[in-house]
Image (cartoon, rainbow, N blue to C red):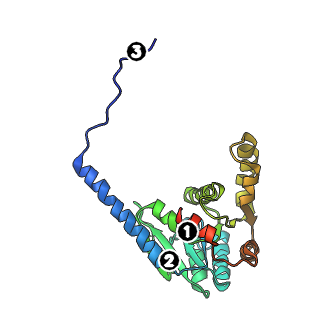
Amino acid sequence: MPSHDKQRPRAHPVDEREFTREAWKVFRIMAELVEGFERLAGVRPAVTLFGSARLPSGHPDYRLAESIGRRLSDAGFALLTGGGPGIMEAANKGAYAGKSLSVGLNIVLPRTQQSNDFQDISLQFQHFFTRKVMFVKHALAYVVLPGGFGTLDELAEILTLVQTGKCRRIPILLVNSGFWSGLLDWMRDTLAAAGTIQPSDLDLLRMVDKPEEVVDAIFTHYGDRGFEPSAEEREVLLQL
């Protein structure tokens, strides 16, 4: 029989200097959020685009991202990316050459991310989570090109928010079916089969391959209702 007189472990003594640093960190987080809300308040309608920072300018997906950025910009959509190289640079470059704003939400990393030169609005973030709020809050669609862990993280974030009702339903477009089809097969054959997601959750995603399909999917989703959130959707976004 286990002993019932064992003492429960106690919390370690508080390091006052460390606690003070952590407390002041809250104000830095607030500052990032306030600046983001202020600088992006008038940037709409906007689309968020993700993809690898590692793909060079000659890569087919780089050229594809540049074309998507230009088409979205000329269609009247501001474009939000992570502001870095690779796919992000390509999309910003296309948007910068178009009619609408090109926005980079840059992140400060231990191995410094190089910001690209194609940003009408450029913001710097210390924290991934505050940056994610900006990506979600200001986007009426997510466009996801091939990428690595960061891209998968951002994709999983928006899927979770939409699935749980913490974000309004928006188009989530996976560009390059040859890259993404294996992931969707795994979601269907493993996650849905195991009951960890509903089969209908896969309807949150759509695969496309061409720039015009991206623009068409967004316009089709919103139809005649317009891009501004409804009163109910605004309330959801306020609770994000």
| 125 with respect to 195 (left or right) | left
**Residue under pointer 1:** 137
Q: How many marks?
A: 3
| Marked residue nearer the N-terminal end (1 or 2) | 2
Q: Residues within 10 Å of mark 1 (few under 14, many from 20)?
A: some
Task: Please provide percent x and percent y for residue 231.
Answer: 62, 71
Tell me the tag on residue 233: none
Amino acid type, callout 3: Ser
| Marked residue nearer the N-terminal end (3 or 2) | 3
| Marked residue nearer the N-terminal end (1 or 3) | 3
**Residue under pointer 2:** 40
- Proximity of marks 1 and 2: CB atoms separated by less than 8 Å: yes
**Residue under pointer 3:** 3
Task: Please provide percent x and percent y for residue 31.
Answer: 37, 68
Amino acid type, callout 1: Lys
State whether residue 133 appears in this view: yes
Name the foreground residue: 74 vs 23.
23
Instruction: State the CA–CA distance, disc 3 to disc 2.
Output: 59 Å
> Residue farthest to the top?
1
Q: Closer to us: mark 3 or mark 2?
A: 3
Name the foreground residue: 59 vs 163.
163
Amino acid type, callout 2: Leu
Q: Which residue is found at the position 63% from the left and 80% from the top?
A: 77
In this picture, is 75 found above or below 210? below
Helix, strand or loop for disc 2: helix
Helix, strand or loop for disc 1: helix
Name the foreground residue: 138 vs 69.
138
| 110 with respect to 229 (left or right) | left
